[in-house]
Amino acid sequence: MTSKDTAVKPAEPSRRDILYIATGAAAAGAAAAVVWPLIAQMNPDASTLALASTEVDLSTVPVGQIVTVKWRGKPVFVRHRTAAEIKAAEDVPLSALPDPEPDAKRVQKPEWLVVIGVCTHLGCIPTGKEGEFDGWFCPCHGSVYDLSGRIRSGPAPTNLEVPPYAFIAENKIKIG
């Protein structure tokens, strides 16, 4: 016997082998066609992506006024505080606050306060420039917030939330 006789010859693919490969490829394509829309539907809606961040022109907000903008479906209060309001917010002793947080930690520039306008008690929308501390008042259950959005009285457990924001120009902020 020679070494040529003992060599293994590769098998020629049969018609059945080709059918198996074609069927497997078609099944994989069909599975991908079914799974792709299921995965794609988990992506955020285009309107949600558009609201991921919002820019606010601060030059239109007079001193002492509050504007409300929408971000991620929530109201955001932007308050242009007066010097007296800043002083009053800074002078509050932390021991008088149910959720102690200094004013300086809640603002990037003292004259601008940016808070999410949703009461931390049950999600109501507080009204501005009201209440005992001239901040915000939630008429639903009586929560009172001060000039820095800190809870002062009522059932709300925490201060109004400060959203992530940055000054992108002297008179413009980007929320989100």
Image: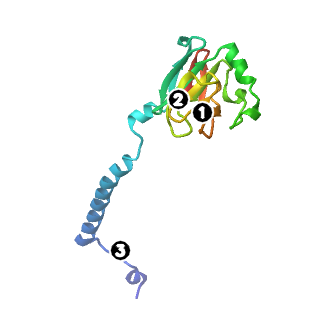
Amino acid at dot 1:
Leu
In the rendered image, residue 50, in percent from the top left (x then y), is placed at: 43, 31
Residue 115 locus on image (x, y percent): 58, 28
Classed neighbour count for the residue bearing mark 1: other residues with Cα under 10 Å, few (<14), some (14–19), many (≥20): many
Q: For this view, does 37 lie left or right of residue 54?
A: left
Q: Residue at x 63, y 17 (%)?
A: 81
Is disc 1 in contact with disc 3, using a CB cutoff of under 8 Å?
no
Asked which quadrant contains residue 109, the reply is: top right
Circle on res. 126: 2
Q: Position of residue 86 (x, y in %)?
A: 69, 19
Q: Give the SS element for disc 3.
A: loop
Identify the mark nearer the N-term, 2 or 3.
3
Q: Are marks 1 and 2 in contact (CB under 8 Å)?
A: yes
In this rendered view, identify the residue nearer to me: 32 or 88: 88
Label 2 amino acid?
Answer: Pro
Closer to the N terminus: mark 1 or mark 2?
A: 2
Pointer 1: what residue? 160
Q: Is residue 163 visible?
A: no
Please say whether residue 118 is visible from this viewpoint: yes
Picture residue at 53% right of the left edge, 33% below the top:
118
Residue corresponding to mark 3:
10
How many marks do you count on the picture? 3
- Judged by depth in the image, the label closer to the viewer, 1 or 3, is 1
Picture coordinates of residue 157 (x, y %)?
62, 40
**Name of the residue lying farthest toward the bottom:** 1
Q: Quadrant of the N terminus?
A: bottom left
Q: CA distance from mark 1 to mark 3?
A: 75 Å
